[in-house]
Image: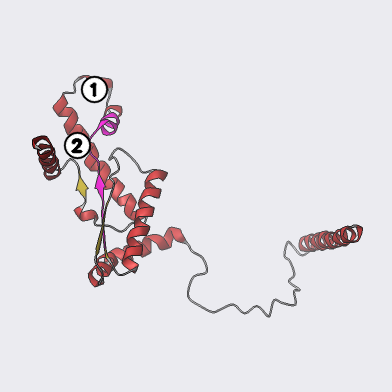
Amino acid sequence: PPLVLRSQRKWWSRIVTRAAATSSGGKKNGGKKKDDSPYKDTVLLPSTDFSMRANSKTREPELQTWWRSEGIYEQLNKEAQRENFTLHDGPPYANGQLHLGHAMNKVLKDIIVKYKLLKGHRANFIPGWDCHGLPIELKVLQSLKSKERKGLTPMSMRGKARDFALKTIEEQATQFKRYGVWGDFENRYQTLDAEYEARQLEVFGKMFME
């Protein structure tokens, strides 16, 4: 309706006029704005030592260091009264730096583990890594010069792939901890471990015999 439109125009005109006046006034006073608001003395903010800023870059490492030094994850599991909940990690490849997919995967799992802890369960997250296959071998080949590739034998290739995988596992584990993920990283499983491979052969043997 015309009346409403006229009212809106007047309202908008007042805002523009005030903004212009404030801007020009700020320039005259050396860029400082004078606070003439009648409400400035009525806003009562709390007096606290708690920081008003997240400052995550500094605070997150401090909190994670405190978690580790105080053994918070282990303590919560020790005090838990309800039944065990164990989540075995669907292992990522040990073939390079983490990306957004790793972050989403581990954070979602961590949410589940922490939820179970808060509900009083003993919640164990067992990290793991897939250390076999073409992705790791490709990374090793990409790191070698042409002459080195030609001199590779199956055994030397496996040795280089093993070394690369173990190095990558340490790097990824450090990064997962930096995400804030809680888990038993000291007792992780790795598919290149002799014990793990032996159990795989045992399962395949039973499948063949049956």
User: Per the image, is 136 magenta?
Assistant: yes
Identified at 32% across, 64% down, the residue is 116
Q: Nearer the viewer, residue 203 or 38?
A: 203
Identified at 19% across, 54% down, the residue is 187
User: Per the image, is 133 magenta?
Assistant: yes
Compared with residue 35, is residue 142 higher up or lower down, i.e. above or below?
above
Q: Position of residue 31 (x, y in %)?
A: 73, 61
Identified at 72% across, 65% down, the residue is 32
Residue pointed to by mark 2: 162
Q: Position of residue 130 (x, y in %)?
A: 25, 41
Query: Quadrant of the rendered structure where residue 28 is?
Result: bottom right
Is the residue marked by circle 2 packed among few (<14), some (14-19), or many (20+) residues within 10 Å?
some
The circle on residue 149 is: 1
Q: Which residues are magenta?
A: 123-140
Q: Residue furthest front?
A: 210
Quadrant (top left/top right/bottom left/bottom right) for the C terminus: top left
